[in-house]
Image: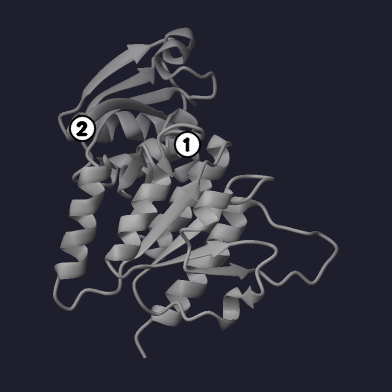
Amino acid sequence: MSRAKYVTGLRTVEQLLAQPDADIVKLYAEYQTSNPRLEAIIEQARTRGIDVQSANRARLKQIAGEARHQGVVAEIRRSTTLDEAGLRTLVEERLAAEDAPPILLLVLDGIQDPHNLGACLRTADAAGVDAVVVPRSGGAGLGPTVSKVAAGAAESVPFAAVANLGKVLGWIGDYGIRRIGTSDSAKQSLYDADLAGHLAFVMGREHRGLRPHIVERCDTLVQLPMQGVVASLNVSVATGICLFEAARQRRPA
């Protein structure tokens, strides 16, 4: 399904304009700018036939819903936002594709901080994740801050917000996709786990980790071995370590 959304920030809009299939409806830009990056963005948008409207900073804040817009707001239609049925279709198509690499999903159990969600999306894009799955309520959703931190990944990685995360993890397992949760109390190290096949990494929310009923849906729990005085890592950092360990194990011999 496609819904109009607003994204802000120079880098994010630059990344959008670099994607030929990005559905940019309109660009709002600060008038009489002396910023060469913003001038280049405006020129590129006009070259692509995108409607560019001038606005003062107060109007940009009103449109974006935040003050840190860096003088530019893009109105887009997200074609990568999925419901549960769309996620199931994506999984089935990926599993049925011949000569395709093993599927890799990232499941986030109620990330609260939009900066963390944006960082997770950016890492997911870089690591080749097929879709990011989150609960529809109880966590951060896609918004201007997430898009800015994700630097274009929020508009490229399929993103599914589902009503019942436990149910979705159930049918993900029915498709033969291993569900690997992370926990500080797990006995197995991430580096000892086999990450070569179809799998879904399940990451817990900040400060609380995975909810008990989500843990029950996981096939395996792993932990990141910590050698210093800190007990745990930020969820976006931990997500990056897990995804790139999977990417390392999956690379062609």
Could you say which quadrant of the image residue 62 lies in? Answer: top left
Name which of mark 1 and mark 2 comes first in the sequence. 2
Nearer to us in this view, 203 or 220:
220
Mark 1: secondary structure: helix
Mark 2: secondary structure: loop
Q: Residue at x 40, y 25 (%)?
A: 72
Q: Is residue 236 visible?
A: yes
Could you say which quadrant of the image residue 46 lies in? Answer: top left
Whole-percent x, y for residue 198 in the image: 34, 72
Quadrant holding the N terminus: top left
Whole-percent x, y for residue 195 in the image: 45, 77
Name the side, left or right, on which 110 lies relative to 11. Answer: right
Q: Is residue 26 above or below residue 182?
A: above
Q: Which residue is mark 1?
A: 146
Q: Which residue is mark 2?
A: 2
Q: Is residue 77 above or below residue 241?
A: above
| Residue extending furthest toward the right | 229
How packed is label 2: few (under 14 Cα within 10 Å), some, or many (20 or more)? Answer: few
In this rendering, which labeled residue sits more in front, label 1 or label 2? Answer: 2
Whole-percent x, y for residue 126 in the image: 42, 60
Q: Is residue 190 above or below residue 149?
A: below
Identify residue type, mark 2.
Answer: Ser
